[in-house]
Image: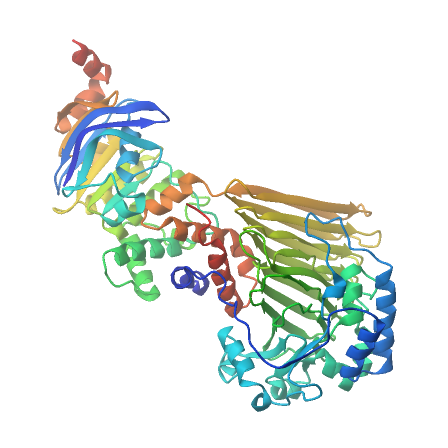
């Protein structure tokens, strides 16, 4: 589904990703781990088409189609979803309204019928219930005054509604207590289907206790330096990233 | 679900590539005085309207005073000198002396013009509960639903008619809130006003429908000088809506209106404006000069006046809807959204004059500057010695789109009373790239994202508008913001 070929990316003139390769098939869940500054978030932003991430080399293919010529919103229309590490606040914009506009934009782009308000309220409420989210979040403004945990849950709710083909979760576990982490993980597990691919970007092995990945990759200095199964995450937890850095150097 | 926001998406798409859709000119025989201003012109206006002597005298007094005044220069706006002798001061559709008496007599072209503006004067309005007093250029041509209002004892008619039929009321109140000598443009208006709206709500009456007036300047080079006078007697309530559109013209046109509101004990007046006069083109050619004096007097105890305005049009907007809070426990409110783009300039705000004890005022001003737009909030909060325990809360937010525009805030606060509490909050923000990225990642286009964020910014004000107006305000905002980014 997703093929990243020899990808190099600069941000503000500085090279962050440096010849990264990755292949993700549908139905798979991949975890990308790495120390601070290794380029994990840059990878997520680049996939979503953030203007600051300038692709200097390589290609990104989603279902055999290059994403590089597509704007952020058109990538979203193709089924790419990025759950953000720091979801921004949109003061005064009602959360439910935002989700409706978002969902309908994506449906329109596919030539599908837009939901009317009533269908939408029911759909959103139902989804919120499945994810055990407080309905009150729907009535508030997008992320405005939300706690860290609420913001992350709101991302998962949107992810569930938009039914992406490829979902990227950028450090969704950061700053969550154990209960919030469980709720988020349950939500993500519910969304694992044979048709959907998921990329989890995380610092910690902890998240992977709840969401068992099929593959684990270690990103260091803008490159994937090692790939394995979930055992690799446990080894990392035990030995730290230096183990790999030193190993790579040796 | 919020109906207002529901329409945003649809209207943005509907209105794309539609610069100023109200820029048509209706060709109707009109009875227009040649340009120029002197006492003779004022005599003629008064004679055409068959006015009682006291009105003519008032006009002449104002004119003589005006000659001694000069154009104010303190506002943060720039415009070339206005040639007051180049303006025609009277324009009436139809031949002189043949005022239409019912809708049947109204020129079909005129009705068509109203239809283009989306103001049907027919039955639909009954369903939406609005009575419309349409001012086409200077004379009110059609007034609907007067019957059902009359049953409630409400007087809703043109000011000219009120001068004829309710002369005592007009004489008692006209100029009592905005004296003829108040300021340069109010003074000019007093000399040459041609028509406007008169509303009288008797004691204890809750006006059974929203009252609405559409102003439309049609003739080229016609200054429009209407006056509105609304009187709410003890314990009454009225909500009044004013909407404005003007056709496209190359030359600047002057609009110098006066609005006076009077609220007695426990009376409540809600006055809403959606103003989208022609703003001129991107180079700043043409457009309306909107120099308006609006003031409400809360004369009675516990009286309440609330101004809500959405200003998206005009080359220059210069107005300060104000409240004189004379009655004890009276309440004044001002909710404003002002958008400037292209070469538009706005210097707008309010004055809250606290005189009575325990008076309260709230000011919420949202200024949006786009392109080269210049947006100024200017507000005065005065707590006089008598205004024991008076309170004011002001919130003044500016949103900038692009890096060529400007937002300016001039709050004046005068407190002469130690028990008064005045709060002022101000913010200036931009739509951040991260906000746009977030919206676009969820599938929204940049334009829809901007429109949504701006609507969110204005929500506090829009929720004060009656439903139909809130929808119109959002439409206007979407049109105004088109092409603002990217």
Rendering coords of residue B306 (x, y %)? 66, 63
Whether residue A132 sits left or right of residue B307 in the image: it is left
Q: Residue at x 67, y 86 (%)?
A: B95
Rendering coords of residue B166 (x, y %)? 77, 84
Q: Which colour scheme is used?
A: rainbow
Rendering coords of residue A132 (x, y %)? 30, 50
Where is B150 relative to B307, above or below?
A: below
Whether residue B128 sits left or right of residue B360 in the image: it is left
Q: Which residue is drawn at 64% across and 77% down?
A: B206
- Quarter-of-image position of residue B142: bottom right
Quadrant in the picture for the C terminus of chain A:
top left
Rendering coords of residue B87 (x, y %)? 72, 67
Where is A34 relative to A73, above or below?
A: above
Residue B327 visible in the current orientation = no
Whether residue B241 sits left or right of residue B302 in the image: it is left
Quadrant in the picture for the N terminus of chain A:
top left
- Quarter-of-image position of residue A239: top left
Instruction: Please tell me which residue lies in front, B371 or A211.
Output: B371
Instruction: Please tell me which residue lies in front, A139 or A108.
Output: A108
Q: Residue at x 60, y 80 (%)?
A: B208
- Quarter-of-image position of residue A168: top left
Whether residue A232 sits left or right of residue B351 in the image: it is left
Instruction: Please tell me which residue lies in front, B256 or B376.
Output: B256
Q: How many marks?
A: 0
């Amino acid at each position: 589904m997703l093929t990243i070929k020899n990808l190099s990316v600069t941000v503000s003139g500085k090279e962050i990703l440096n010849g990264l390769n990755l292949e993700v098939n549908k139905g798979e869940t991949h975890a990308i781990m790495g120390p601070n500054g290794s380029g994990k978030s840059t990878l997520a932003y680049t996939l979503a088409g953030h203007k600051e991430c300038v692709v200097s080399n390589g290609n990104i293919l989603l279902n055999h189609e290059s994403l590089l010529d597509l704007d952020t919103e058109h990538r979203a229309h193709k089924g790419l979803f990025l759950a953000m590490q720091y979801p921004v606040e949109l003061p005064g914009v009602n959360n439910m309204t935002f989700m409706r506009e978002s969902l309908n934009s994506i449906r329109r782009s596919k030539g599908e019928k837009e939901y009317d308000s009533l269908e939408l309220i029911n759909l959103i409420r139902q989804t919120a219930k499945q994810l055990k989210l407080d309905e009150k979040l729907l009535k508030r403004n997008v992320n405005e005054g939300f706690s860290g945990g609420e913001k992350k849950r709101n991302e998962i709710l949107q992810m569930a509604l938009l039914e992406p083909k490829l979902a990227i979760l950028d450090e969704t576990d950061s700053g969550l207590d154990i209960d919030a982490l469980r709720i988020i993980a349950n939500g993500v597990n519910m969304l694992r289907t044979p048709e959907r691919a998921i990329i989890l970007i995380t610092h910690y092995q902890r998240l992977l206790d709840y969401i068992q990945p099929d593959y684990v990759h270690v990103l260091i200095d803008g490159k994937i330096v090692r790939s394995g199964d979930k055992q690799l995450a446990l080894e990392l937890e035990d030995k730290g990233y230096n183990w790999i850095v030193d190993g790579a150097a040796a | 679900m919020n109906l207002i926001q529901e329409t945003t998406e649809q209207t943005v798409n509907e209105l794309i590539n539609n610069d100023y859709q109200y820029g048509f000119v209706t060709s109707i025989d009109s009875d227009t005085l040649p340009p120029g201003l002197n006492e003779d012109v004022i005599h003629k206006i008064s004679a055409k309207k068959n006015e009682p002597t006291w009105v003519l005298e008032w006009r002449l007094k104002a004119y003589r005073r005006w000659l001694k005044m000069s154009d104010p220069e303190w506002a943060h706006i720039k415009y070339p000198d206005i040639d007051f002798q180049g303006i025609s001061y009277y324009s009436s559709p139809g031949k002189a002396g043949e005022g239409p008496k019912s809708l049947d007599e109204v020129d079909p072209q005129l009705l068509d013009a109203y239809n283009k503006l989306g103001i049907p004067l027919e039955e639909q309005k009954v369903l939406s509960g609005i009575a419309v007093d349409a001012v086409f250029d200077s004379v009110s041509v059609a007034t609907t639903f007067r019957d059902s209002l009359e049953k409630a004892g409400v007087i809703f008619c043109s000011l000219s008619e009120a001068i004829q039929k309710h002369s005592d009321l007009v004489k008692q109140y006209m100029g009592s809130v905005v004296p003829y000598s108040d300021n340069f443009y109010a003074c000019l208006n007093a000399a040459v006003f041609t028509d406007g709206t008169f509303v009288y709500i008797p004691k204890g009456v809750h006006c059974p429908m929203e009252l609405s007036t559409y102003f439309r300047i049609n003739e080229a080079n016609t200054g429009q000088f209407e006056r509105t006078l609304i009187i709410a007697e003890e314990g009454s309530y009225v909500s009044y809506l004013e909407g404005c559109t003007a056709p496209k013209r190359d030359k600047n046109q002057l609009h110098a209106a006066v609005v006076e509101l009077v609220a007695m004990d426990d009376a409540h007046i809600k006055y809403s404006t959606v103003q989208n006069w022609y703003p001129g083109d991107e180079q700043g050619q043409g457009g309306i000069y909107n120099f308006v004096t609006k003031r409400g007097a809360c004369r009675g105890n516990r009286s309440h006046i609330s101004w809500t305005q959405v200003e998206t049009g005009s080359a220059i907007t210069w107005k300060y809807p104000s409240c004189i809070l004379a009655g004890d426990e009276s309440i004044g409110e001002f909710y404003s959204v002002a958008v400037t783009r292209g070469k538009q300039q706005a210097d707008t705000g309010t004055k809250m004059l606290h005189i009575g004890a325990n008076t309260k005022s709230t000011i919420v001003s949202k200024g949006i500057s786009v392109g080269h737009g210049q947006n100024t909030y200017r507000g005065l909060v005065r707590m006089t010695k008598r205004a024991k325990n008076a309170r004011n809360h002001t919130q003044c937010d500016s949103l900038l789109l692009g890096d060529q525009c400007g937002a300016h805030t001039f709050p004046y606060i005068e407190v002469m009373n130690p028990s008064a509490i005045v709060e002022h909050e101000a913010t200036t923000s931009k739509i951040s790239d991260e906000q746009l990225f977030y919206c676009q990642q969820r599938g929204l286009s940049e334009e829809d994202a901007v429109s949504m964020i701006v609507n969110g910014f204005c929500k506090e004000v829009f929720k004060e508008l009656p439903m139909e107006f809130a929808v119109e305000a959002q439409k206007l905002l979407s049109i105004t913001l088109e092409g603002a980014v990217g």
